Image: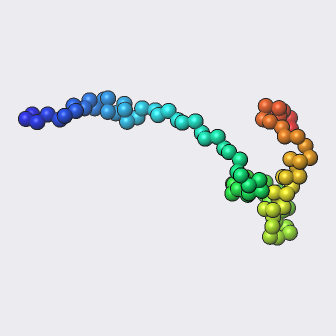
């Protein structure tokens, strides 16, 4: 070879580098929004019967679900995942 490559490559090393697992960065800490009543778009799974119940009265069903959830958290203390029992 008259002009050898500047960086000779080892096919095995190149393959290992290509498939080397990368370290995942820690997921960012979610900071509460500055506006306390700002709504956020989310996607959740709800039983069909629950959805039907809130949609019976027509438009505003998402607001009604939000209000019921807000009342639920105001009435009872929050339970963390470690405090929950499997029997609930």
Q: Quadrant of residue 13?
A: top left
Residue 49 location, quadrant: bottom right
Q: Which image quarter is the C terminus in?
A: top right
Q: Is residue 52 visible?
A: no
- Identify the residue shown where x is 84% and y is 61%: 64
Q: Residue at x 17, y 35 (%)?
A: 5
User: How many numbered marks appear?
Assistant: 0
Quadrant housing the N terminus: top left
In this rendering, is residue 31 above or below 87?
A: below
44 relative to 22 in the view: left or right:
right
Q: Position of residue 54 (x, y in %)?
A: 84, 62
How did the renderer colour the structure? Answer: rainbow
35 vs 86, nearest the viewer: 35
Q: Is residue 43 above or below residue 84?
A: below
* Residue 76, horizontal then vertical, whole percent: 90, 43
Q: Is residue 47 visible?
A: yes
> Toward the viewer: 58 or 32?
32
Residue 82, position in %: x, y? Answer: 79, 31
Snapshot quadrant of residue 17: top left
The x and y percentages for residue 26 are 58, 36
At 54% across and 36% down in the image, what residue appears?
25
Q: Is residue 53 above or below residue 13?
A: below
Taking the image as shown, residue 8 lies to the left or right of residue 55, namely left
Side of 66 where 16 appears, left or right? left
């Amino acid at each position: 070879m008259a002009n050898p490559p500047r960086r000779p490559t080892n096919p095995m090393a190149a393959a290992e580098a290509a498939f080397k697992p990368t370290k995942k960065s820690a997921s960012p800490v979610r900071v509460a929004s500055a506006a306390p009543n700002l709504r956020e778009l989310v996607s959740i799974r709800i039983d069909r019967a629950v959805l039907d119940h809130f949609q019976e009265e027509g438009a505003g069903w998402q607001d009604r679900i939000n209000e019921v959830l807000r009342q639920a958290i105001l009435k009872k203390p929050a339970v963390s995942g470690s405090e929950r029992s499997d029997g609930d």
